[in-house]
Image (tube, helix red, strand yellow):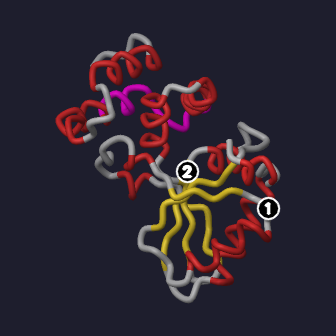
């Protein structure tokens, strides 16, 4: 954790909402912002706080980078441009499965596809990630059989991600899902 991250406060659901409202106010045009990771967790309520807000901009709202440059300081939060498709292949239909949050100004906000988030968390393998995936499964936000099917769908593309160990990823998915048939 950097010095700047230690100085900024933790992020709760209210702070995520304030960020979305501010981005909507300051963006100069239409676009979509997908929330990822801890931001999804706090808005869904299975975590009270997170240390940063991960975002994917697609399509990028005009002016959003200028807004983020000062909003992170104004709101005392960390903002990262990070999404599952940077770490694992994009899942087919991810955009259509991304739950809609709302529109602020001309900007539409979504949670990045929860199946993609779950698989990226399984691949990363941190303790908090495992708890998040367990919550998604227990709350019915992702279905075990569908998660397995989507993992199998990206199997042929795993070689395009050299930092990813496909065999270890498969073992991690197997462990997270238990005895769900492939």
In magenta stretch: residue 148: yes
SS state under label 2: strand
Report the side of 147 relative to 130 (left or right).
left
Evaluate if marks 1 and 2 touch, with contact meaning CB atoms under 8 Å apart. Answer: no
Q: Is residue 171 above or below residue 15?
A: above
Circle 2 packing at 10 Å, graded few (<14), some (14-19), many (20+), is: many
Question: Closer to the N terminus: mark 1 or mark 2?
Answer: 2
Give the secondary structure at mark 1.
Answer: loop
Q: Quadrant of residue 141?
A: top right
| Front residue of 27 and 115 | 27
Residue 59: in magenta span: no
Question: Crowding near pointer 1: few (<14 within 10 Å), some, many (20+)?
Answer: some
- Residue shown at the point (64%, 45%) measured from the top left: 38
Q: Which mark's residue is nearer the viewer, 1 or 2?
A: 1
Q: Is residue 43 left or right of residue 37?
A: right
Residue 14 spot, x, y in % from top left: 80, 58
Up/down of 24 relative to 89, above or below: below
**In this picture, which residue range is highlighted in magenta?**
139-149
Q: Quadrant of the N terminus?
A: top right
The residue that label 1 is drawn on is: 76
Q: Which residue is mark 2?
A: 36
């Amino acid at each position: 954790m950097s010095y700047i991250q230690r100085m900024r406060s933790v992020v709760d659901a209210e702070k995520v909402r304030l960020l979305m409202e501010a981005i909507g106010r300051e963006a100069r045009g239409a676009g979509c912002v997908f929330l990822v990771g801890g931001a999804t967790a706090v808005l869904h309520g299975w975590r009270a706080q997170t240390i940063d807000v991960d975002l994917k901009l697609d399509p990028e709202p005009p002016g959003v980078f200028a807004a983020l440059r000062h909003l992170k300081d104004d709101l005392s939060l960390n903002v990262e441009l990070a999404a599952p498709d940077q770490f694992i292949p994009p899942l087919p239909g991810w955009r259509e499965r991304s739950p809609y949050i709302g529109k602020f100004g001309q900007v539409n906000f979504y949670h990045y596809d929860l199946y993609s988030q779950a698989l990226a968390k399984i691949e990363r393998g941190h303790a908090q990630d495992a708890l998040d995936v367990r919550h998604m499964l227990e709350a019915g936000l992702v279905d075990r059989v569908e998660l397995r099917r989507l993992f199998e769908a990206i199997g042929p593309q795993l070689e395009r991600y050299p930092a990813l160990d496909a065999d270890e990823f498969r073992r991690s998915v197997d462990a997270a899902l238990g005895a769900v048939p492939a």
